[in-house]
């Protein structure tokens, strides 16, 4: 079977992207205030990162805080920010030990100086690691990403480095938050909602979508395995016919 991403039956995802939803409902189900679900969500992050390391999945992108999540009550936003700082500080050693390379994607300029510093330190500490690339999307929005890419191209045209005719899909993709990383093969959303909520809009053009009713703090290795099993049974056609794709599989095997 060929490894070319534009062909054949899916195998293990090279890039897994997850909307970690349902922390608030998980807490409320236990009679706790909704923000008590977020620390439980961090425990699930730790489990899933380790499961991806064991499976040798090359890239994991987690949606931690959207550009719209600032609309939540200030108390919850502040608690999430504090948790983010504490978790970065606490988890970075373990990430490093597991050869995980951490990158935060999103507009970090809105974060406190302390959080920005914590992010920069964690990224620097894990920068040379060769294992899993863990991308944490924080103050991230797919529309923000496309907009900042368009702005950057416009600046290059204004300065004469680029002509408008040179702008094609590849040029725009290169300006997005993570260029050079394969697009997500598998997208998982926990918590039962069937929407993308402004996550990776450009990058998910041909991503396989998987939705589960499990709330994020309940997501574990078994749930990940179920998602991967479902994914590996799918035929990815990228616009071609099923017969064409099957023909390629037969030729390549
Ligand atoms: C996801 O869980 C975490 C963040 C958005 C930060 P939620 O907090 O959205 O949980 P529900 O969807 O309200 O249950
Ligand atoms: C999406 O969850 C964002 C994150 C998980 C970080 P939300 O809970 O914010 O999404 P909506 O508002 O239900 O669409
Ligand atoms: Mg939610």
Image (cartoon, helix red, strand yellow):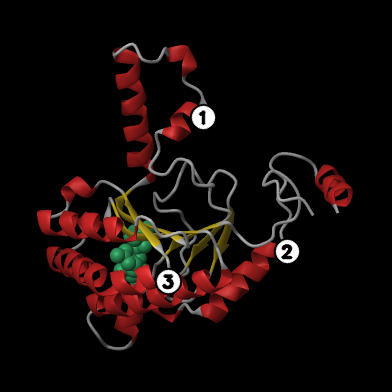
Q: Secondary structure at mark 3?
A: loop
x and y percentages locating residue 56 in the rendered image: 56, 66
Give the Cα distance between marks 2 and 1.
30 Å
Q: Residues within 10 Å of mark 2 (few under 14, many from 20)?
A: few
Q: Is residue 250 left or right of residue 86?
A: right
x and y percentages locating residue 213 in the rendered image: 50, 73
Asked if residue 219 is positioned above or below residue 18 in the image, the reply reads: below
Asked if residue 27 is positioned above or below residue 239 in the image, the reply reads: below
State if disc 1 and disc 3 touch (CB < 8 Å). no
- Which of discs 3 and 1 lies nearer the camera? The answer is 3
| Marked residue nearer the N-terminal end (3 or 1) | 3
User: Residue 139 bears which disc, if any?
Assistant: none
Q: Which residue is mark 1?
A: 170
Q: Secondary structure at mark 2?
A: loop
x and y percentages locating residue 151 in the rendered image: 31, 27
Identify the image quadrant of the C terminus: bottom right
User: Residue 98 bears which disc, if any?
Assistant: 3
Q: Is residue 75 left or right of residue 92?
A: left
Q: Is residue 240 left or right of residue 220?
A: right
Of the four image quadrants, the one with ligand 1 is bottom left
Give the Cα distance between marks 3 and 1.
33 Å
Asked if residue 242 is positioned above or below residue 218 in the image, the reply reads: above
Question: Which residue is rendered at x = 45% and y = 30% of the image?
Answer: 172
State if disc 2 and disc 3 touch (CB < 8 Å). no
Q: Secondary structure at mark 1?
A: helix
Q: Which residue is mark 2?
A: 233
């Amino acid at each position: 079977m060929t490894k070319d991403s534009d062909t054949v039956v899916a195998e293990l995802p090279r890039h897994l992207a997850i909307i970690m939803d349902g922390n608030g409902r998980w807490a409320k189900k236990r009679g706790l205030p909704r923000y008590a679900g977020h620390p439980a969500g961090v425990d699930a992050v730790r489990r899933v990162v380790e499961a991806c390391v064991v499976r040798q999945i090359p890239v994991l992108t987690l949606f931690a805080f959207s550009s719209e999540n600032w609309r939540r009550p200030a108390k919850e936003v502040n608690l999430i920010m504090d948790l983010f700082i504490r978790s970065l500080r606490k988890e970075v050693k373990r990430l490093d030990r597991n050869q995980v390379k951490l990158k935060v994607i999103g507009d970090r300029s809105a974060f406190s100086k302390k959080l920005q510093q914590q992010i920069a330190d964690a990224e620097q500490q894990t920068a040379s690691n060769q294992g899993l690339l863990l991308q944490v999307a924080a103050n991230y929005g797919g529309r923000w990403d496309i907009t900042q890419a368009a702005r950057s191209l416009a600046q290059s045209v204004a300065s004469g480095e680029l002509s408008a005719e040179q702008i094609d899909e590849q040029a725009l993709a290169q300006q997005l938050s993570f260029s050079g990383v394969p697009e997500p093969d598998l997208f998982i959303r926990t918590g039962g909602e069937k929407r993308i909520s402004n996550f990776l809009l450009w990058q998910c053009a041909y991503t396989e979508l998987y939705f589960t009713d499990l709330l994020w703090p309940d997501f574990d290795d078994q749930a990940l395995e179920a998602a991967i099993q479902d994914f590996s049974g799918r035929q990815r056609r990228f616009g071609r016919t099923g017969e064409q794709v099957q023909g390629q599989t037969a030729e390549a095997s």
